[in-house]
Image (cartoon, rainbow, N blue to C red):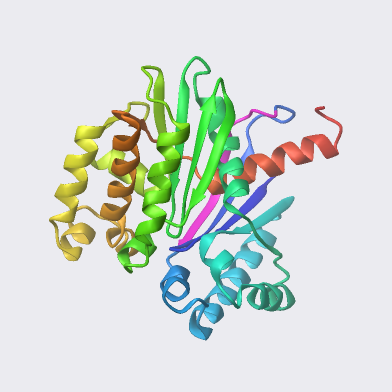
């Protein structure tokens, strides 16, 4: 049994195919079967021109054609394609959705920030110790979703138009940054048991470049040092010495600064970075839906 997740983000589009390791277990781990990442950078168009250009729309259609063929080859039992901030903001997003479905058969769901956060948390909540409270921070290309988690359950949530691609393009409104800071001060009370958990490829890579082991937390001071070290490197040094994908090399320092600002505002000094994201949440959502539909689990 195999499921496929398509994540259409502001910086890249991804296809992830995985199979459950233990049939009948809603909390099973998954074995990756296929992973393809394409740096289409839809946000470059949208955050500048408010719509996706014909060139990018054509590339996205071709990507979905390729993904549809791969899903057919792997004989997946179910899939879900989710688009986030760039497609949400694009004036021609709905037309592109319709055109892609007509040509490729792939149905794209443009999800809001709350649904995006909920799906990601489906992949990480079992990983979190219930005795601690967590601030979940998901930094993407177009938006940042923040959720306060208490005793293993989401408690407060908000989405902000603060993302790495927006920041690189100089399209982050100062008023939005102030709104994010005000929300954090209103809803997040600094406490000794409050931890941060970050999701998204950039925080995972920052965690790795800082020399942290997979289950270790990243200290705020080390996050700051690593971010500023990367910021001082040229694009070529980031790509060839740090071995970053070119599109990630352009935005990773912006991601670090977004995380740093949130942690400092909340007086949090460490952040965990499990290698989980929207694609993993979609897979788990499809698996649990399959179990419910099959009357295997309540």
In this rendering, the answer to whether 242 lies above or below 172 is: above
Name the one closer to the observer, 105 or 113: 113
Residue 186: image quadrant is top left
Whether residue 213 is visible here, answered yes or no, is no
In this rendering, the answer to whether 257 lies above or below 39 is: above
Whether residue 120 is visible here, answered yes or no, is yes
Answer whether residue 28 is magenta in the image.
yes
Q: Position of residue 4 (x, y in %)?
A: 64, 52
Residue at (65% x, 66% y) in the render: 68
- Residue farthest bottom in this picture: 54
173 relative to 102 in the view: left or right: left
Name the one closer to the observer, 86 or 82: 86
Q: Position of residue 253 (x, y in %)?
A: 26, 53
- Residue farthest right in this picture: 295
Answer whether residue 117 is magenta in the image.
no
Q: Position of residue 298 (x, y in %)?
A: 82, 27
Residue at (32% x, 60% y) in the render: 245
Residue 221: image quadrant is top left
- Residue farthest top in this picture: 131
Name the quarter where the N terminus is drawn.
top right
Residue at (25% x, 33% y) in the render: 220
Q: Which residues are magenta?
A: 26-37
Residue at (76% x, 40% y) in the render: 289
279 relative to 1 in the view: left or right: left
């Amino acid at each position: 049994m195999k499921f496929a997740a398509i994540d259409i983000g502001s910086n890249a589009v991804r296809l992830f195919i995985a199979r459950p390791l233990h049939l009948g277990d809603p909390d099973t781990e998954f074995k990756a079967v296929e992973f393809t990442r394409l740096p289409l950078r839809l946000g470059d168009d949208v955050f500048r021109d408010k719509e996706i250009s014909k060139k990018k729309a054509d590339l996205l259609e071709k990507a979905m054609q390729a993904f549809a063929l791969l899903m057919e080859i792997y004989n997946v039992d179910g899939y879900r394609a989710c688009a986030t901030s760039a497609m949400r903001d694009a004036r021609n997003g709905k037309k592109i959705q319709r055109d892609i479905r007509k040509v490729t058969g792939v149905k794209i769901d443009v999800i809001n920030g709350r649904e995006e956060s909920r799906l990601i948390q489906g992949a990480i909540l079992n990983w979190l110790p219930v005795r601690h409270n967590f601030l979940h921070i998901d930094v993407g290309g177009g938006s940042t979703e923040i959720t306060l988690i208490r005793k293993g359950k989401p408690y407060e949530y908000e989405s902000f138009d603060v993302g790495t691609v927006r920041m690189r393009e100089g399209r982050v409104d100062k008023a939005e940054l102030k709104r994010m800071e005000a929300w954090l001060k209103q809803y997040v009370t600094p406490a000794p048991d409050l931890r941060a958990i970050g999701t998204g490829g950039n925080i995972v890579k920052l965690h790795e470049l800082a020399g942290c082991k997979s289950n270790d937390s990243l200290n705020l001071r080390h996050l700051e040092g690593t971010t500023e070290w990367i910021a001082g490197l040229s694009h070529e040094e980031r790509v060839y010495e740090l071995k970053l994908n070119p599109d990630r090399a352009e935005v990773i320092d912006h991601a670090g600064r977004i995380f740093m600002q949130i942690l400092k505002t909340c007086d949090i000094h460490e952040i965990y970075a499990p290698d989980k994201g929207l694609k993993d949440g979609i897979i788990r959502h499809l698996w649990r839906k399959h179990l419910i539909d099959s009357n295997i689990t309540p």
